[in-house]
Structure formats: C-alpha cells, structure tokens
Amino acid sequence: MSEHTDAPPFIIGKVEDFAGWARAGSMWPATFGLACCSIEMMATGTPRFDIARFGQEVFRGSPRQADLMIVAGRVSQKMAPILRQVYDQMAEPKWVLAMGVCASSGGMFNNYAIVQGVDHVVPVDIYLPGCPPRPEMLINALLKVQELAREKPMLRHRREIAAAAEAAALEATPTSQMKGLLR
Amino acid sequence: MTDVDNTQGGELAPVVPEGRTLINVRQGAFGASGDTSGYDGLTRFVYMPDAAERPYGSWFDQVVDVLEELLGDDASAAIESVVVDRDELTLHIAGSHLLSVCRHLRDDQDLRFEMCLGVSGVHYPADAGREFHAVYPMQSVTHSRRLRIEVSAPDEDPHIPSITSIYPMNNWHERETWDFFGIVFDGHPSLARIEMPDDWVGHPQRKDYPLGGIPVEYKGAEIPAPDERRQYR
Amino acid sequence: MTKESTSPYATAGLGEDDGSAPEFTVFGGDWSEVAEEAARLGEQRLVFNMGPQHPSTHGVLRIMLEVEGERVTECRAGIGYLHTGIEKNMEFRTWTQGVTFCTRMDYVAAMANEAVYCLGVEKLLGITDDIPERANVLRVLMQELTRIGSHLVAIGTGGNEMGATTVMTTAFIAREETFKVIERITGLRTNNAYIRPGGVAIDTPDDSVDMIRAMIPDVKQRLDELALLQLENPIFKGRLKGVAKLDLAACMALGVTGPILRSAGLPYDLRKSEPYSGYETYDFQVPTSTDADAYSRVVIRLEECYESLKIVAQCADRLEASVGEPVMVADKKIAWPAQLSVGSDGQGNSAEHIRHIMGESMEALIHHFKLVTEGFPVPAGQAYAAVENPKGLLGCHVVSDGGTKPWRAHFRDPGFNNLQALSMLTQGGQVADVVVAIATIDMVLGGVDR
C-alpha cells in the first residue's frame, strides 16, 4: 500500500489513544450478577442482543482477569463486603457499571437490608437506571463505558484531571439544596 | 409501624374474649406524622375471626374429631381453639403439646399431613401475653388439603418447641423465624441466623423494628423513608 | 453440641480448639503451597468456600465444602446474600403495590409470585369466584409462559455451568420468543406487575392471539434443538445420570416439591391436585420419572415445557373466544382503575379513561383517586394460597388488620425449602457434581432470600 501513496509507512498517535482503543474493544466483565438484572445481563450475552459484537461476552469468573464489574442487582448488607473484596481484587484499569436502580440507589427497596446504592461501597463510573433495564439499555451503558475507556487519560494527565474533578465536586451544591429549578 | 396499644387502663381498654387474637389497635387513619383530617382520635380494635362452633363444615369436623380422639385427655389442653374462616381451618395449639399434635398429624392415616410448609412468624404487639404467633401450614399430599396450626408465645419468653424432629423440612424455616422475630425454637439442631449477617443485632420483622430506609433526596426536596411517611393505613 | 449455654446461637461452641485437625487460613495465597503443606502433614481434607460470587452457583449462594481429595465429605449452604426485606417492605405498601414487591422474589418466573399473592389477597377479600373468566385465562397464560422461561433458564444455565455454552444460547433464544409475547401483553419483559388483586392489569392488544400462535412452533423448535443437543450426548449423560439422587422418602422428609419430587416417582402437581385459576379445565399432563437423578429432572423440565405449550395453545383459543370481556373483577371498589395505552408522548392513561373519569363519572374519578393513592381495605383475618411454581410449591400467607396495607405477608418459596436438600445431594459425591446438584435444584436466590 505504501507504493500507492506518498504517506509515510508509520502511524502517529498518542499512547492514550492506542491504549484506549485496545481497552475499549476487549472489555471483559466480571460476573457480579445478583438478582433480576443478572438475568437481563445474561440475556444481553445471548444471541438476540449479543454483546459479543463488542468483545464483551467473555464473563470472567475470576476478578483478576476482569476489567468491568457490572453490579447487576440489589446489594444486601451481607453482600457488601464481598462486593468490595471483589472490586479490590480486580486489576487496574477497572470500571464499575451500576446496573439497575437497586445498584444505583437502592431502588424500590428503601429498607434495612439493601445498601442504598453501591457507590457507598465502590466508586461507580456509569449508573444505569431501570428495573430491570432492557438489554438494549445495558448495551447503551456498555457503549458509554467503552467511551470512558477510550478517553481514559493516563499518568500525570490522569492525576491532574482527577484532582480537578474532586475540587469541582467539593464545590458543587448538594442535591437537596438545589432549589428553585421548577420555575 | 406506630399502631401501639396505649389504651391499657383507660375506658378504651378492650375486653378480649378468650383465645381471640387482637391483631391491632388502629389509632387514627394516618401513619407517622400529624393528621389534619380529624380522624386522629379514632381508635378501632381489630380482631381475628371468632372461634368456630360445631359443625365446622366440609372435612374440618372429621379431621378435628380424629385429632381429638388421638390426643385423648390432652385434647382440650392441646387445642386452644378452632377457627374456620374463608374456607380454611386454623387450630390454635398450646406450645407444650405441639410435638404430639404434629406427630399425630403426620402419622395417622386419616390425617396424613406429610408436609409442613414452613413457619410464618407474625408479631401482634397488641395481643398481650401472646405477641408472637408461629403459623405452620400443613399440607396433605394424600388427601390434597391444607390446615393451619398456630402457636403463640409471649414477648418475655418467646420459646416454642421445634418440630424438626418430626418435620425435618422445617429446619431452615425455623431458623428464618428466629432470625426475623426472635422466637427461640427449643430442640432445633442449629438455631443460627440464616438471612441476616451473623452478627446482626435485632430481629428485623418485628413490628417495633424500623423499616430502616433513608430519606429520598430530590432536587430541592426530601421525602422521608417509607415507614415515616404520612400515608393512609 | 450439648454445651451449657443460654445462647441459642449454634456457633456458641465454635472456636474451641481441641487440636484435632490442622487449620490453614488462606487469604489470597498460592494454592499449591497450601496443598503441599497439607500433603506433608498427611491431611487431605480441605474446607473451602464456593463463595457468593461464583459463576456456577446460580446466584449469590455460599457453599461451604469440606473435601477429601475430590470427594465431598460435607456441604453446607449459606444464604442471605440477597435478602431484600421484601416481606417487611410490603407491610408499608398498599395491597396492589405489594404485587410489585413480591414479583421480584423469584425473578425468573416473576408472575407466579404475583399469582400466589393475588390468590391469597382474593381469598381474604372473598372474591375468588368473582374473578372474570378472561382474567383467569390470562393468568394461566402468563404463568405457563413464565414456567417455560424458568425451565429454559434452568436447562440453559445448567448447561452453561457444565461448559456447554450453546445450550444456554439456544435456551435463551427460546426464552426471548416467549418474552416477545409477554412484553406485547404486559408491557415488560420481566418483573411485570401484571397480575393484580381482582384480575389482571390490562386487556390484551388485538394481535396477541396471532402472536401467541406464531410463537408456539418457534419455541417448540428450540426445545427440540435442546433435546437433540443434550439428551443423547454421552458427556451430558455421563455428568448427569446417577448424579444428585434424592429418593421419594428423602423428598417427603425434606418437603421437596416440584420437578425433584416428580423425578422421584410421585406425580404431585398442585395444578392437578388443588386446581386454581381454572386449571382443572385445561388438558395437560404431569411428566414423572422414577430415576430420581439429575438427568431425569432435565427431561422432566423439557417435557413440562411442551405441556405448557399445550396449555398456551388452549389459552389462545379461549382468548379468541372471549374478546371484549372484562379482565378485572366487577366490584369497582377493588378493581384496578387505570387503563394504560401508548399515546403520542409515551405510555400513560388512555384518552378514553381520562375522558371518563374527568368528564363523565364522578364515582369513577373518586374510585380512581382512592384506589391509587389509598388502596382498598381488606377485611381482617388470614389466608393461605399455594400455586405450582416451576420450582415447586409456592405458598403465600397473608394477614390483614382490616387496613389498606398487609399486616404480614410471608412467602414459602420452593427454592428455600429445596435448597436444604443440597447436603444430601452432594455429600459423598465429587466436587464437579456439586455444580450439577445446584443446577438440578434450580433455586432462585431472590426467592430463597426474599
């Protein structure tokens, strides 16, 4: 091909871009299916919805080999330490997708037994509402995680961005103080 | 749940007939917070259906007859009352006779209630002296019918004999009822928590245990947890 | 275990070191080192966790296994990792809202939970005979479609856990066919709050009978594929024949119902022995076997799918014959008032219903308002209802204090009961058979833990 163009026979790009492209195309979810959402997650892996087209149908049983933890379902008080342990056992880079309302915020179960949102236990990258979310919604969320992976900054760049995000979050108004929006 | 019985000693104190369960004393129409409807002063006593009179109807008479015959002299002490309601037979059994009643239910060929469908604990805080009820639905595979055994225990001494020696299937059910209500089943091989974490304090499904939710945050507003909301009871 | 102690906790005797066995506490170490040390000490016995997070435990189930070499000497199941407090939460919601909670217990066959709860509530209300015929047909249709879905998940995940992914993809394709029909009729794929006290939530759209009739041969073809793929396969037979045996005496002692009891030889099915929702008028059979092993249970589940398809075909005929009939009980003080339809801005109350309650009938507006915000009161008392879940006998005990919210709702889930049998199914066998045993019990941890 290099005989047909004047372009030089090499590709220039940022390391971040190459790493992001590789990570996004081969994200392996860890099996953390808990409840009803796990059945929808399994359905997403099956031929009608088929996340194999995104390279994500290999659900790894071992967290050491997984990149993405899809917390699918309600997390009970008894399960929360195990959730944290599995998250800790995953190797960087890792992403967390809170699938369903129970994982995002406790959902309809506002009671003694359910952790009101897994962000009390692990840092969450994408929240996916739904009870349970349709497989198409899960695929949408997975594509967004792919975007995150593709754009993920590395090294010093990442530290700067993280520090800036934390400062902004500390300055922001808490949800219950955001008044006057209905006018 | 804030429907607490606070009518002892007043002119509203209920006269509870023997053996009849006072389910609840309903104060006012709304739950937790203040009521503007004027129904706050309304007090209603809600009872379980009365003990039934003979004949009970359909196959109930035959079953109770056979059971009384097998129990012999203990029959009147064992069977506290018989309730027939909504086509279902409920036998209120005294805890001390529970094992012999269950053995007869399982073994006698006219009864043959082979399966015990578990224990359902119910907490009636208004039913003084008999707060915890353990409800055992008994299923007869041979005769395709079902009856209910109900045993009560007071709050101060919540002990009920375990029937796992007769119905081994009740093992986990009794553990669950201990976990959620604090009813101790004497004679159970390993009465440990099963649903809640092992070091949990308290028995969650009791009426005096809060639901435990958190207030829901919206932009500019906050809704209290479900058991603290103002809702029609 | 006869320790002098007033504490009822079984772990009261734990922690007493009588020096009988060497103890290795492993936390993220290297297995080969541990095994070397154990072999050096002459002990081959290992106790380990098949922990809550595991691809083969059908959900969050913790299994404590004590193995000697490859043989399981002791197996205990630890549950509670999905305990949601559904039963307590239902005490703070109206009777109709309770349907949305109980449907999430056994999330694989969601509408069976709804059906048993509604049967219990209707018993308390005394309207069991007033449920319209068409509503009963729809209830039967939904329960059978979810039965097919549940058995397909059991067969599919069972195959997947043994390493045969094609079994799972085929089973789930068939399941998707049933979901197309369920979604068309109820609006959701799963966790549909469709069966409500008094009937069902909404009537069927016009093309649903044709959809059902078109679906039946598709599902049958997939079931044939599953049978062809698995039943004569020597590896499948080798892994499942003679494994996880539970004979009739053990089943009766442990109160095991469902396909496990039917594989032990007793043709016990609540749809036949204590029919509900009009099941006595349908023509179907109850597959039974006497082998009592995992293989016969897979065969029974496949056969039950075919029988369910027979019932679904009969339901389609009855739906066609009863077009226009009500799907909710006639008593306006109980019947769920809203009629949903899809408008220009999404799903909501249909325009005719809004016109009726706003313009035509004051009573209808009052009923709508009171039923949705406050709910209907149920006379005091208690009732018990039981249905044949795909997994066994599902029971519901409801107690009412005369109010609009339950005083107590307790569910007897067949998975909770059947899981007690796990020790009997696995002890003495091999570690790989534990996976098969769990798959054959087919419990759903949402129902087990509630």
Image (spheres, coloured by chain):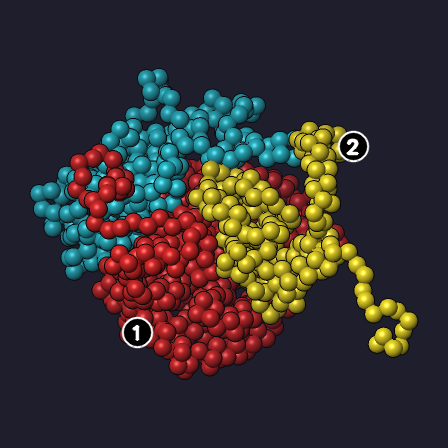
Chain colours: A yellow, B cyan, C red
Q: Name the residue under label 2.
A: A183
- Comparing labels 1 and 2, the label whose residue is closer to the camera: 1
The mark found on residue A153 in the picture is none
Q: Do the residues labelled 1 and 2 touch (CB within 8 Å)?
A: no
Q: Mark 1 points at which residue?
A: C242
Q: Identify the amino acid type marked 1.
A: Gly
Q: What element carries label 2?
A: loop
Q: Residue at x 33, y 75 (%)?
A: C241
Quarter in which the N terminus of chain C is drawn:
top left
Q: Give residue B208's quadrant in the image.
A: top left
Q: Give residue A24's quadrant in the image.
A: bottom right
In the rendered view, would you say A146 is above or below C316? above
Q: Which residue is drawn at 34% across and 59% down?
A: C36
**In front of the other: B98 or C230:** C230
**In front of the other: C253 or C198:** C253
C309 lies left or right of B217: left
How far across and down, in percent of the image, does residue C374 sit? 54, 38
In the rendered view, would you say C445 is above or below B131? below
Q: Which residue is drawn at 57% across and 73% down?
A: C215
Residue neighbourhood size for the residue with mark 1, other residues' Cα within 10 Å, grouped as few (<14), some (14–19), many (≥20): some
